[in-house]
Amino acid sequence: MAFLDLSNLQKFYGTNHVVKDFSIGIEKGEFISFLGPSGCGKTTTLRMVAGFEVPDQGAISIDGQDVVRLKPNQRNIGMVFQAYALFPNMTVAQNVGFGLKIAGKPKDQIAERVTEMLALVGLKDFGARYPFQLSGGQQQRVALARALAPSPQVLLLDEPLSALDAKIRVSLREEIRNIQRDLGITTIYVTHDQEEALSMSDRIVVMHDGIAEQIGEPFEIYNKPASRFVAEFVGTLNLIDATVEDSSTGRVKVAGQHLELGRSLEAVNGATVSLALRPETVRLGRIADGDQTLTGLVEEVSFLGSVVRIKVALGGNHIVLDTFNRTISKPPSIGDQIEVSFPSESVMI
Amino acid sequence: MSKKIWSWLALVFGILYFGLPLLGTLEFSLKMRRGVYSLDAYAAVLNDPQFRATFSYSVIMALFTIVLGVIIVVPTAYWVQLKYRRLRPFIEFITLLPLVIPPIVVVFGYIRLYNTSSWLPLTGSAMGTNILLMFGYATLSLPYMYRAVDTGLRAIDVRTLTEAAESLGANWLTIMTRVIMPNVLVAILSGAFLTFAIVIGEFVMAALLNRPAFGPYLQIMGANRAYEPAALAVIAFAITWACMGLIQLVTRFQKFSRVAR
């Protein structure tokens, strides 16, 4: 049995079935992300682990102990909230020491642990301040220190970076991951941001409509999506309608142009299939022999700083590709006819 | 431009409407000694043992009423905010009832229910009647206390703060006393001061329950003296304003308040 075991969890709100038969085993020290769009059941699942929601069916055990009947204050779980949830009437040090005070620890032990935790999150000199005197990023660091101070068995983070600006999000997610690794604490991280999930997690659970669509390592989730939803939700995806010409060799036709996919297809000849391509696998022009090539018209050019995103029209289809911004080569203009190429093995069907 | 004139006119009218009677009362209260302004009326009132006895009684009753009000209202408003939001209209309706039902109806109901031949004869003893009066005062101040506390609770994220405290091991009592109440202290104090002002001036319940409160004393003085009632009215206003000033002070000096200092 895994350290944190969720098995066959079900949750209804009235007639709305929000979590459907959700199961996962999480090993000690593992960092798991629940990734999915709003309303997919990820936060509800997290709240069931925290004890704020009671599952209608299923079991939750931590280190072999069934915790479903335990109240949130009996579970020894640390939680970080999207809205920080720092107690406004307490200083930073009092916030961090709150859990320890509740546990009845001696004053000197509390002071020592508070100093240690504040140093861990880089806020050593902020103990006497009140939450309203801190920035959003600092408040979230305090919230993390507060959650970690009582040495919980499991750390739960509910979209902790959503309210912060982009730069702080990136730096703080690295900090969170480093702290989690250093402490070796089992962590569940809820997010709708795929970049966060991909960059931080040991494993990702992609959730959709109350179901775990796929559980896997970030590389696996991105490169081998188990369903169309996962492929579309994680990363940007080009979907192209193609007509099968020869299913045994994998020859298909897109906007009057032929592609050789080099593998047999399940669809019968004449059927329409969807080809999926990640933008980063598509190149401008013909790069290598054996690459599949399509010709189309440039419809949009978006400058994104280090990357230029080009949208190419192929009959009724579109392909979006990313190319590095190089000062020596100018990106194509709207209306230009260009070739795009990609290796046949990068095509997902 | 014309809009500004109307605003000024409205302000002047307001000041005259509210200020003139007060000014008149104040002036009259200072005219006890013939031909000169003096504080004789105030001295007479403050030296009256009846004033001190009734005022002390009402202050003590007000303090007990505030405690009772806080015990009833804060947890109720908290649970409505946290778990039973659907009950909000119902609770609000209940708390508004004291504004609709006249105190005389309430007190007759009390006398009927708790008289000496009832199953709970509270009116049979002075202490019992005091308790009954305290409940009556708590009922009268319910609309103000509930609204003040509810507004304070709406200003903070009750649910997340509660959950954060729970996840750190806190029980219900700890959450209420260490997390929720300190963060709605100003709201509670607003309700408390309003309650205080209501209790100090209340007449009907105290008179019909025959308790030595400040309200009936005001009435007796008003019926039998000339200048002293005016002095008492000014004192009552001063107490109310002092209460409001205290609310402002508490808000201003609360350490964790965002109000600029």
Image (cartoon, coloured by chain):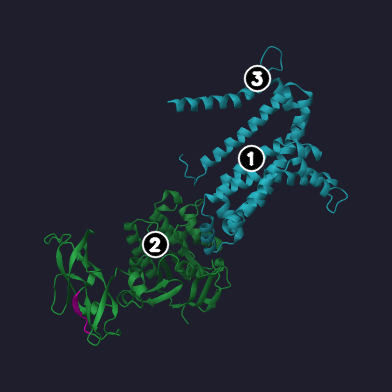
Chain colours: A green, B cyan
| View extreme (top): residue | B35
Q: Amino acid at mark 3?
A: Glu
Q: Which mark is residue B27?
A: 3
Which badge, 1 or 3, is on the more N-terminal residue? 3
Question: Considering depth in this image, is B101 or A85 the residue closer to the camera?
Answer: B101
Segment tinted magenta in the rendering: A256-262
Q: Position of residue A32 (x, y in %)?
A: 40, 72
Q: Amino acid at mark 2?
A: Leu
Q: How many marks?
A: 3
Judge from the rendering whether residue B135 lies leftward or rightward of residue A147; answer left or right. Answer: right
| View extreme (bottom): residue | A248
Identify residue for label 1. Answer: B194
Question: Considering depth in this image, is A278 or A242 the residue closer to the camera?
Answer: A242
Q: Are marks 1 and 2 on the same chain?
A: no
Identify residue for label 2. Answer: A120
Kindly identify the residue that appears in the image at 31 percent across and 74 percent down: A222
Kindly identify the residue that appears in the image at 39 percent across and 65 percent down: A192
